[in-house]
Image (tube, rainbow, N blue to C red):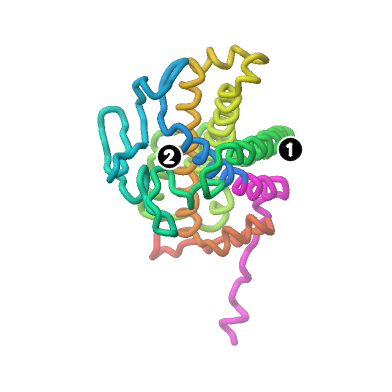
């Protein structure tokens, strides 16, 4: 009983405000649908080019293809066999298919370019509007200055290297430090919010023939519509990589506490390390 009386209650802090939580979950759903519908659109022509133009006879720097028996991915001159996963695979009914990406990874699950485009364009608007509102809130309500601003001491190579080593050793911040973003988180979130997501939106607009008449300078900015399509594809998979690392970090840091804080806003601070743990 004495041990129970002396135990300090868990300390909680209000870590995520409501706009951040709403944007987080809307963004997660939106990006998932955009990825899956984008893979359906990519299935219509699974080749990427640089420059203004690109068609079947032209050299593609990236391609997903198939032979009568195998599937493959080609990057430059390097060819990787991907039978059963990409290029040639078997669906749930045992029928061999030759789309680039399998049906379980696309929206819709059966080949339908028109529906894929409808899903993609609708949720592209959801992404654009939500990102614009979130960026305005970030700038006007102090979230950027309070949570994402990189302070002078954090730019130190020694400080950055220390955080990299801590992450590699799975040594996560404890106590009050756990409620603040570390330098690697700041780099990641700033890169996603202010670089990758806007890049996805603007390269998507560049691929729209209708928007080209409104802002033809976008085509020149990205070096042509095919270059914009390649950048769009690369940025999409960079977001997938960020998502996977993010999920792994959440699982390692304590999924219940992390997810609960992104739902309720309240985060339970992990106890400080004892001298023997340091």
Q: CA distance from mark 1 to mark 2?
A: 28 Å
Tell which tag, 1 or 2, sits nearer the viewer.
1
The C terminus lies in quadrant: bottom left
Q: Nearer the viewer, residue 55 or 63?
A: 55
Q: Look at the image and say whether residue 57 sits in the magenta stretch.
A: no
Q: Which residue is mark 1?
A: 141
- Horizontal and vertical percent for residue 18? 72, 50
- Horizontal and vertical percent for residue 265? 68, 56
Residue at 39% from the left image edge and 37% from the top image edge: 158
- Horizontal and vertical percent for residue 221? 53, 15
- Asked if residue 204 is positioned above or below residue 236 in the image, the reply reads above
| Disc marking residue 159 | 2
Would residue 212 appear left or right of 191 to someone viewing this image?
right
Q: Residues within 10 Å of mark 2 (few under 14, many from 20)?
A: few
Asked whether residue 7 is in view, the answer is yes
- Horizontal and vertical percent for residue 268? 60, 62
């Amino acid at each position: 009983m004495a041990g129970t009386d002396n135990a300090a209650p868990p300390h909680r802090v209000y870590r995520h405000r409501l706009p951040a939580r709403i944007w987080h979950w809307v963004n997660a759903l939106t990006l998932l649908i955009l990825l899956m519908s984008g893979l359906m659109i990519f299935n219509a022509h699974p080749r990427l080019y640089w420059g203004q133009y690109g068609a079947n006879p032209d050299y593609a720097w990236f391609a997903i293809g198939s032979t009568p028996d195998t599937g493959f991915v080609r990057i430059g001159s390097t060819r990787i066999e991907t039978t059963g996963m990409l290029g040639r695979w078997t669906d749930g009914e045992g029928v061999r298919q030759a789309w680039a990406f399998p049906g379980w990874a696309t929206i819709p699950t059966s080949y339908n370019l028109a529906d894929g485009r409808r899903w993609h364009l609708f949720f592209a608007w959801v992404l654009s509007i939500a990102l614009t509102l979130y960026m305005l809130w970030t700038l006007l309500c102090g979230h950027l200055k309070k949570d994402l601003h990189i302070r002078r001491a954090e730019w130190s190579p020694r400080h950055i290297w220390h955080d990299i080593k801590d992450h590699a050793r799975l040594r996560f911040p404890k106590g009050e430090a756990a409620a603040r973003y570390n330098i690697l988180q700041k780099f990641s979130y700033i890169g996603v919010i202010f670089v990758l997501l806007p890049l996805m939106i603007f390269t998507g607009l560049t691929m729209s023939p209708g928007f080209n008449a409104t802002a033809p300078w976008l085509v020149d900015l990205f070096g042509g519509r095919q270059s914009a399509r390649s950048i769009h594809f690369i940025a999409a998979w960079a977001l997938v990589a960020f998502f996977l690392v993010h999920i792994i970090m959440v699982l390692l840091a304590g999924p219940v506490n992390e997810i609960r804080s992104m739902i309720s806003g309240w985060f339970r601070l992990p106890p400080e390390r004892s001298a023997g743990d340091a």
